[in-house]
Image (spheres, grey):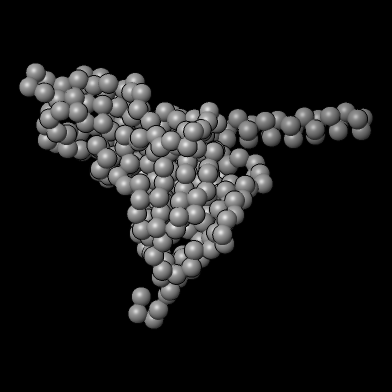
Amino acid sequence: MYIFRFLIIYSFVFFIVGCASENEHSFGETEINKHTKLHQKRAVVLERNGLKLTEIVDYPRFSEAKLLLLSDNIRFSPGSNVLEFKIDNFTLGAVTADQEKFYQNDVLAVQNMVIINNKKLIKQNTETSAQIDLSMGENKIFVFLNRSFNVGLKNPESSLFFKVNIDDKGSSFESLLPDSILYVTQPRGSYIGPNAEKVIFDFMLHNVKLEKGYYVSLNINDIEFKIDFYAPFWIEGLGYGRHKIAVYLKDNEDKIISSIINPDNEYYIELKELSLFD
């Protein structure tokens, strides 16, 4: 009798657990974000001349997010055009889980879609339709999904790269482009007070696999770090003041690979001490 009761109780518990796993998609956005994190692994740490890069590992991955352009029967023209996108497993306008750990400067504090046209950042869009200006000739457009703390999604299906050609005869659309892309999202601008203690380095790639001989060369005040895997990092040890940042995509012979879309490879950021007047 006791064995029979135990089996009934065990079966009931197993049934509840099974139902919970089957209904996992009914969780709210925050719960889904937390469950999509990978098991925390030991972070890679790179150190040179007082600077330290630490791989960020404890953040929501959105590994099942997908971004699609609804391009059927689109006719493009010079000037303003509306593009429609379909997004799965990622909510524009939501706040990414654990944002308080990563929020820094000049960040649109909700999940968004970054649109870059011909090396110019158009917008960080929070709707699935986007209005962009196209010009006569060739328009190359890179789009990717972005967390609310400005770290882009790294899975291949969460970004798009396509070309729109416009001439006197009409327009054409092409999506299978061979060009390589390196786009740096962070660090940018100024960081004040506690946000200056460490800053995020994040970048987006397209048509590039770092494990095949390519690497990202991050130069901070002429100190080079070679990054051969796709991940964001914390930068520590900068100190207050202006700092030169230079980022390039290179091959196994240390030759720079031209990126079709990257507004600027070399620029400055500034870290400021918090004052009573800020």
For the point 41% across and 32% down, which residue is it? 206
Q: Horizontal placement of 73 versus 93: left or right? A: left
Residue closest to the far bottom: 276
Height in image: 49 above or below 95?
A: below
Between 89 and 229, which is closer to the camera in this rendering? Answer: 229
Height in image: 71 above or below 217?
A: above
For the point 53% across and 28% down, which residue is it? 212
Report whether residue 21 is seen.
Answer: yes
Give residue 253's position: percent from left, percent from top: 49, 33
Q: Quadrant of residue 78?
A: top left
For the point 25% across and 37% down, which residue is it? 117
For the point 30% across and 45% down, which residue is it? 263
Q: Horizontal placement of 34 versus 85: left or right? A: right
Between 65 and 198, which is closer to the camera in this rendering? Answer: 198
Q: How many marks?
A: 0
Q: Horizontal placement of 170 versus 179: left or right? A: left
Q: Quadrant of residue 189?
A: bottom left
Report whether residue 32 is seen.
Answer: no
Between 74 and 182, which is closer to the camera in this rendering? Answer: 182
Give residue 134's position: percent from left, percent from top: 17, 34
Query: If the image is split into quadrants, where does the C terminus sit?
Result: bottom left
Residue closest to the far left: 168
Q: Quadrant of residue 113?
A: top left
Give residue 254's position: percent from left, percent from top: 47, 37
Give residue 11's position: percent from left, percent from top: 77, 29
